[in-house]
Amino acid sequence: MLLLLLCTPYENDFIAGYLVPVFFIIFTLGVGNLRYPFLNLTWAVSTLCLLNYNQNFLQGVETEYSLAFILAVLISFSVCLLYMVRIYHRSEWLNRRWHLQALTDPLTLLPNFRALEQAPEQEAGKSFCCLRIDNLEFMSRHYGLMMRVHCIRSICRTLLPLMQENEKLYQLPGSELLLVLSGPETEGRLQHMVNILNSRQIHWNNTGLDMGYGAAWGRFDGNQETLQPLLGQLSWLAEQSCAHHHVLALDSREEMVSGQTTKQVLLLNTIRTALDQGDLLLYAQPIRNKEGEGYDEILARLKYDGGIMTPDKFLPLIAQFNLSARFDLQVLESLLKWLATHPCDKKGPRFSVNLMPLTLLQKNIAGRIIRLFKRYHISPQAVILEITEEQAFSNAESSMYNIEQLHKFGFRIAIDDFGTGYANYERLKRLQADIIKIDGVFVKDIVTNTLDAMIVRSITDLAKAKSLSVVAEFVETQQQQALLHKLGVQYLQGYLIGRPQPLAD
């Protein structure tokens, strides 16, 4: 309509004076609202019409200079318009491309969790199947990240031919994939997929990788609020199914799974709150020799809601969620505060503190412990550090370095639970330790089991050759006490010697 008014043969000052600027404004606004080819075509047609039927468009132009100026403006606007259109549509193309990349895992090229969150209602009523690759984390630490990518791509190549056209495969964080299946017999199909994966071996650099697979499935109702809880429950079930490679269905276990996951989360929050508030209770259990001399082992409890949480409840979660170093440092600091306010002339150790396995894997943990003792002006000879055998020696370089630094500073080192797992004779041979604590499995039946007695004798003989002290744990009867002393054990710990008691104020 505007173009027709400008091209009419009737001369009008209003049309020439006001509608010409509006004409340019309309095309400028069209840059963001019209498609690139259509805008170019309409501008070309409009320009051609204005130049041919120009009575209103060029009204008042009387000299060639005015005409040249008007044409220059028209040409400049044409160039600017084309440039703006090109820039705008390139920007839109880049935005679409970046948005697509944000919804895609850059290595596996699978849609990621963000893509799943974009339109969950599209997946309503479908079966969400969580596939867990059991050994992927361990293998990727050994073989590297690209091995992880290669495994996921290989798994996808195996699964995609078994899926229907409208079914999808998503990359979840960690070692899991999410299959969105819409066909019937979900459990049977998923079990078939798991069986195929477990029957095949993935090869990386001519090395066969033994991967284990487990899966769980459940129905998704399309509600955004239920998406993450559903995936959390499926993840927990899939982890359980890895043990026997049998697919688990959430439908029949929803209350149980929800209770398990919710209980774990609540317990973790309780532990974090207790650590944040310093709600630690220190207990001391005596370790004594024949003469009744010795020291006490510090055992920690957590206060919560007016009650006391025992180590068997909070230690597994502390280890699982990488809170070991924080917990051990808080226990040490609480003990050092007590020692600073309760000085004693006694020479030698007064207490022993057990460091959790993962604590020693922290590269700077030895320095942090040493700085704590310097801050409170406590001699390292006052506290024995007990090193648990499980995982503590799995990373020889960092663990041995920390032990060496602590030993140099003056700490006495005890190997806890000796005789099981990693704490074997070969490691004892090259470990800078001062005390061996014999695991209770060799003590509880030592009176009736001659093999246990022989094992304890061999440990004490080796310890004597290396000038190490020996402590036996879980001593509960006088018969055990007499036999252990006869076998060469210097110190005993257990309910017979004394139960844990709160550290006196």
Image: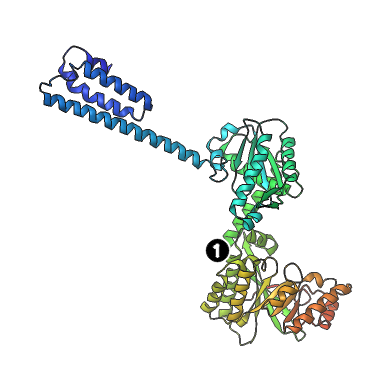
- Horizontal and vertical percent for residue 125? 64, 32
Describe the element under mark 1 as helix, strand or loop.
helix
Question: Exactly how many numbered labels are in the figure?
Answer: 1
Q: Quadrant of the N terminus?
A: top left
The front one of 194 and 420 is 194
> In this orientation, does residue 499 appear?
no
Q: Residue furthest left?
A: 63
The front one of 241 and 87 is 87
Q: Quadrant of the C terminus?
A: bottom right
At x 64%, y 33%, the residue is 126
Which quadrant of the view contains residue 255? Answer: top right
The front one of 22 and 152 is 152
Q: Left or right of 163: which side holds 62?
A: left
Asked if 211 appears above or below 313 in the picture, the reply is above
Residue picked out by circle 1: 277
At x 85%, y 76%, the residue is 454
Asked if 124 appears above or below 311 in the picture, the reply is above
- Horizontal and vertical percent for residue 294? 70, 82
- Horizontal and vertical percent for residue 282? 64, 71
At x 17%, y 26%, the residue is 70
